[in-house]
Amino acid sequence: MWVAVAGLGLLPHPYPQLPALAAGAGLFVLRRRFPATVLLGLAALTGLASCVAPVTAAAAFTVARRTEQARRRARLLTAAAALLVVCATVSAPWLGPGPMAYGLALGLVLTPTAVIVPGLVGTSYGQQRRLVRALRERGDAAERARRLADSEARIHERSRIAAEMHDLVGHRLSLISLHAGGLELALERAEPGLREEAVLVRRTTRDAMRELRQALGVLGPLGRDTGPEALTDATGTRADLEALVARSRDGGIAVRLDWTGPDLDARPAPVRRAVHRVVREALTNVHRYAGAAHVAVTVVHGHASVRVTVRNGAPPSRPGPAVSLGTGRGLTGLRERVELLGGTFDAGPLPSGGFRVDATVPAEPGDAPGRPGAEPEEPERREGEAGSTGDEGGLAPGSRTAAHLLTLALGLVALSVLTALGTAFVHATAPRPGAGPRPLPRVGMTYGDVAATGVLDNAAVRAAATGHEPPRPAGTAGCLYPFNGATERAPGGLTIARYCFDGAQRLIAIDRFTVPSVRDAAPWENP
């Protein structure tokens, strides 16, 4: 910018601006540590030397982007703009275009390009940056909350399973202890030698019961079903599911049960309870979110697996705002229960607007089903999900940074061009020494001064004045008859100016007189 403006010869004092540029570069390095001081200092330097404007623009952008308080940012930019205008106006007679009015004009030209526009752009960038950071933090918090909720749901379901195992195994151990006590009494008379073996069995069973209560008893109240929903030996059979369907019909839901294959009464209790829990949780969700929809419950009991599918259609109307959207913990618990048995679980919306829950459980889970110590794999994060670290608009982070830097560089170049044009315009229109209209000749000026004003003798005008001019003033040594002083006053006459000088070549008189003009006659007027 300095080369462009100084190269045109428009700066009256170009070289004093170089130290100002060096001082501006030194202040710019401290913009992050002392933002307010640096911005005000650069604004003052810009008023003194307009070529510092690009440095001030970069500092204004940085300060506005990093200042979070809106009022402080507005006061800082306003103070910088006012200081720039004041410095440009005051320094105009010595370092600027000259008159203070032109200094004020220069300050008003530099303020938008050096302070206001970069400050507004920096404010926009800063707000966007803080908004993106807040959205990322919010998305991360939501992701952590979701994972915590899923973990709580899995722990709750495992606690429920532990409570069921406590009830089932405890009942079996109680029967073993009871039979061992009877056997002890019977062997006391029949085989006294075997009585100690029966006592050992009873004591071992009692110790196992105590250890089981210590390990799992504390978890029982957290997940145990009570009341009409309590799990029994009939849980998960066809009669049990028909009872669930009947209660849903009584609640106003159009539900249908389709059963394929034999009953589940011969299957292990964990399988039957998993089937019961899937159907019950799915019907509960239908009651909550789609009470007017049609529901189909399908159970397919094969040789190796049991598949349960609960599908409901789209509700006639969307749930009101008072209906809770739920947390999804119920489905997470079902997934945990089914996968612990070595099965698969899937739940999601249908294209038609309904919802489907599908679970497949092995008919004979075996001794070590599932993976009790492992956490389920996190599903792939969907595109656009909150907290996602994916690329915006298909650009990699490095590409986005390069694009931002290129945009800022082009903007700074454009501001520099506008600043250079404005500075050149103000300096070009400012008055310069010796500029303006030439002074008019006046009595007392020397011959050289009069000639410098453009008054030169013309032979044709002198010939026209010969014989028609008035007498020359006394002491006249010579006269000038300039052409620019002869104008046609009226048809037939010319006004001639005469400048008479004395022997010392000083102007002593300026006379104007009219002489008749000579006009050639038209061809048809000649005799």
Image: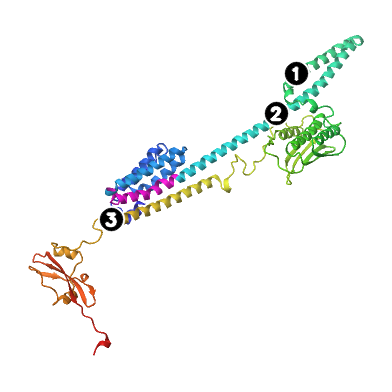
Rendering quarter of residue 386 = top right
State the SS at label 1: helix
What's under tag 3, amino acid-wise? Pro
Spatial separation of the CA atoms under disc 2 and disc 3: 86 Å
What residue is pinned by disc 2? 155
Q: Is residue 211 magenta?
A: no
In depth, the one of 432 and 144 nearer the eye is 432
Residue farthest to the right, as pictured: 190
Q: Amino acid at mark 2?
A: Ile
Q: Eyeballing the image, is 249 above or below 510?
A: above
Residue placed under numbered mark 1 in the picture: 211
Tell me where residue 389 appears, x and y as whole percent.
59, 41
In front: label 2 or label 1 = 2
Which residue occupies the foreground of this view, 204 or 141?
141
In the picture, the quarter occupied by the C terminus is bottom left
The residue carrying mark 3 is 431
- Against 472, residue 55 (above or below) is above
Task: Determine the CA span between mark 3 and mark 1.
Answer: 105 Å
Asked whether, in this view, residue 402 is left or right of residue 377, the answer is left
Horizontal and vertical percent for residue 52? 36, 47
Q: Which residues are magenta?
A: 94-119
Question: Residue 435's x, y, as percent?
Answer: 25, 58
* Mark nearer the N terminus (2 vs 3): 2
Mark 1 closeness class: few <14, some 14–19, many ≥20 residues within 10 Å: few
Q: Of the residues shown, which amino acid type is indicated by label 1?
A: Glu
Q: Main secondary structure of the magenta part?
A: helix
Q: Position of residue 79 (x, y in %)?
A: 38, 41
Q: Quadrant of residue 524?
A: bottom left
- The answer to whether residue 504 is left or right of residue 315 is left
Relative to residue 429, is residue 380 drawn left or right? right
